[in-house]
Amino acid sequence: MTLDARQYTCPDRFAQEKQRIFQRLPLVLAASCQLPRPGDFSTLEVAGIPVLLVRDKAGAVHALLNSCTHRSAAVASGCGSTARFTCPYHGWTFAQDGALLGVASSADFGAVDRAALAMKRFPVAERAGLIWAILDPDSPHDPGAMLGGIDTLIAGFGLTHWTMIERRVLHGPNWKLAFDAHLEFYHVPVLHRETFGPERSNRAFYFTHGPHQRVIAPQGRPGDVVPDDLYTLGRLPTSGEPIDPLLMGEWILFPGTSINTFYIGGIRCVLLSIVVPGAEVGTSTTTQTFLAETVPDDAASAAMRETSAFLAHVVGDEDLPTSAFQQKVIGTGLVGEVRFGRNEGGLQHFHRWLGRALDSDNAALPALLAAPCPQ
Ligand code: FES
Ligand SMILES: [Fe+2]
């Protein structure tokens, strides 16, 4: 399969992706356990859109445009816990659901329609321990209705009450060049020969579920007796069947999220990687969030942080610099196309689905995403 290389650098194509992918599709923005208690909040930016995630008193998660309705300053930064938000510019205050609570020196504003001056709210759905949102306050769609059952499969991970160990943000080039490196293992024994080692397999099985997929190297855990079809997406293990083979490998949630499983000190851990565009065509962020199934003791926690730092090194010092070079040379206009082999099926599936979702009109989009076909 070949791809026109300008798809990685063309500002018009990028504007379409921002609008038709990142503001129409449900995006994984965080793990539920990043906001375990009422009042917990976290901020992030997707395609130049600042987002504030917050859990309210009743336990519901809100996804808000992180922008004060007075003159657009950021209402919150970083992450933390708070009963209400106070804008750091002039002091307007907002509730956990974005409602306007207070106007500083309100007499100087006369009568204010508070309901109309709530922070903008994005449609949000919390499923399977992940928080999905559609970054369009006027979207006609319900994010939970567009997951096509992938949330049921992810529920098998049991992520809901896990513990966050670490979170870091890595900066990279165009979001697709950054994400392409998640979609094949062909490069693993070569680019990562110093980190993962040259003996790693460069092949992968690709199992797809609508636009989503699972990429797994053709080796299981020693001693596991695994029914062949348990490696596929689309069915959950019955009782007594080992769940581990289904969790290993890399789960890809369209458009830009991946989940990798590890066992550290006997505790199941995942690295949740969320790749999103920056504000410009040649920028992206990869947010790596390292989660553990149970609260680790000091020794296990140290081992998890070590693994987390190792994975940041692999992606930040090996994958992303390679992608940045691709971006630079494609940007010269001297590269006509890039090519994907049969062993890079994950890339073929991803780029085909990207085209399909871009081309879909609004009315057809939910059905396209909700049906786990065509592949
Ligand atoms: S911009 Fe927030 S109070 Fe002025
Ligand atoms: Fe890699």
Image (tube, helix red, strand yellow):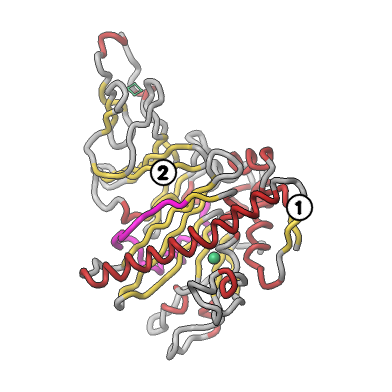
Q: Position of residue 287 (x, y in %)?
A: 44, 53
Residue 92 forms part of the magenta stretch: no
Q: Which residue is mark 1?
A: 335
Residue 26 in view (yes/no): no
**x and y percent of residue 245 in the render?**
46, 79
Viewer-side residue, 196 vs 19: 196
Q: Amino acid at mark 2?
A: Leu
Q: Quadrant of ligand 2?
A: bottom right
For badge 1, the amino acid type reads Val
Q: Nearer the viewer, residue 130 or 125?
A: 130
Please name the residue shown 36% across and 61% down the image: 290
Q: Is residue 7 visible?
A: yes
Foreground residue among 265 and 366: 265
Q: Nearer the viewer, mark 2 or mark 1?
A: 1
Left or right of 44 in this view: 330: right
- For disc 2, the neighbor class at 10 Å (few under 14, some 14 to 19, many from 20) is some
Disc 2 vs disc 1: Cβ atoms closer than 8 Å? no
Determine which quarter of the picture holds residue 243: bottom left
Quick one: quadrant of the C terminus? bottom right
Q: Residue at x 72, y 46 (%)?
A: 332
Q: Mark 2 vs ligand 1: CB under 8 Å?
A: no
Instruction: For marks 2 and 1, give the CA distance.
Output: 33 Å
Looking at the image, is 86 positioned above or below residue 201?
above
Q: Is residue 8 left or right of residue 80?
A: right
For disc 2, the marked residue is 44
Q: Residue at the spot x=65%, y=49% of the render?
A: 328
Question: Regarding mark 1 in the picture, which secondary structure is present there?
Answer: loop
Q: Which residue corresponds to the image point at 24% horizontal and 46% vertical from the top-left?
A: 38
Q: What segment carries the magenta color?
A: 146-170
List x then y, in percent, for residue 6.
Answer: 72, 47
Q: Circle 2 — which element? A: strand
- The image quadrant of residue 201 is bottom right
